[in-house]
Image (spheres, rainbow, N blue to C red):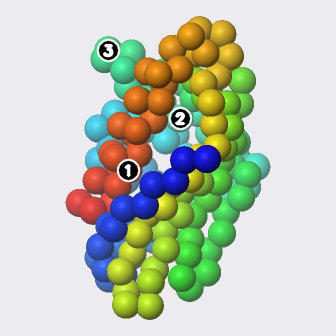
Amino acid sequence: MDVDDVLVGSADTVSRAAGAESTADVDARTDGVGSGLPPRVEPGQEPTIRVRLGPFRLPEPSRVIDVFETEARCGFTYGTKPGHPITGEESFILIRTADDRVFLVLRSVSRAGLGIWRLGEPFVRLAQIICRRRYGRALRS
């Protein structure tokens, strides 16, 4: 399991990105990572995320497994579908601490997908790290 956490700001500054803004607004700032998600995700939705790789846009079919929202945490978990470069699940969680700081926690249990993706596992991992950094940057901006 991979876990990354990034301080993205205070509750006041992050609430716009996490609540009032749609995921599409966040996607516009992630430099080529487009989620294909509607403004509010719901369990059972099956978006196809599109990731830019040079002049290409790679489809990453997925399924939203869980969506949660409490006073201190909100987020969602998705699982990959056939055709995705990785096989597994990833969670995006915003956690608000008692001192009003907000952290983005990204958890993934995954490995390179089948076929050619398995041969390129080191590159798939590198792409995953780059995308994670973009998500944190998008919420901080």
Circle 3/circle 1 CB separation < 8 Å: no
Q: Is residue 21 visible?
A: no
Quadrant in which residue 32 is drawn: top left
Q: Residue furthest bottom?
A: 98
* Residue 71 disc label: none
Q: CA distance from mark 1 to mark 2?
A: 14 Å
Residue 6 lies, in percent from the top left, at: 36, 62
Residue topped by disc 2: 49
Residue closer to the observer: 115 or 122: 122
Residue closer to the observer: 71 or 104: 104
> For the residues carrying marks 1 and 2, which lies nearer the camera in this image?
1
Where disc 3 sits, the SS reads loop
Residue closer to the observer: 111 or 35: 111
Circle 1/circle 2 CB separation < 8 Å: no
Residue 36 lies, in percent from the top left, at: 52, 40
Q: Residue at x 52, y 53 (%)?
A: 3
Where disc 1 sits, the SS reads helix
Residue topped by disc 1: 135
Q: Residue at x 56, y 85 (%)?
A: 71
Decide: few, some or many residues near mark 3? Use Cα within 10 Å; few <14, some 14-19, many ≥20. few
Where disc 2 sits, the SS reads strand
Q: Residue at x 38, y 50 (%)?
A: 135
Quadrant in which residue 66 is drawn: bottom right
What residue type is disc 1 on?
Tyr
Marked residue nearer the N-terminal end (1 or 2): 2
Q: Is residue 6 visible?
A: yes
Q: Residue at x 51, y 14 (%)?
A: 120
What residue type is disc 3 on?
Pro
Q: Residue furthest left?
A: 141
Residue 113 lies, in percent from the top left, at: 64, 22
Residue topped by disc 3: 55
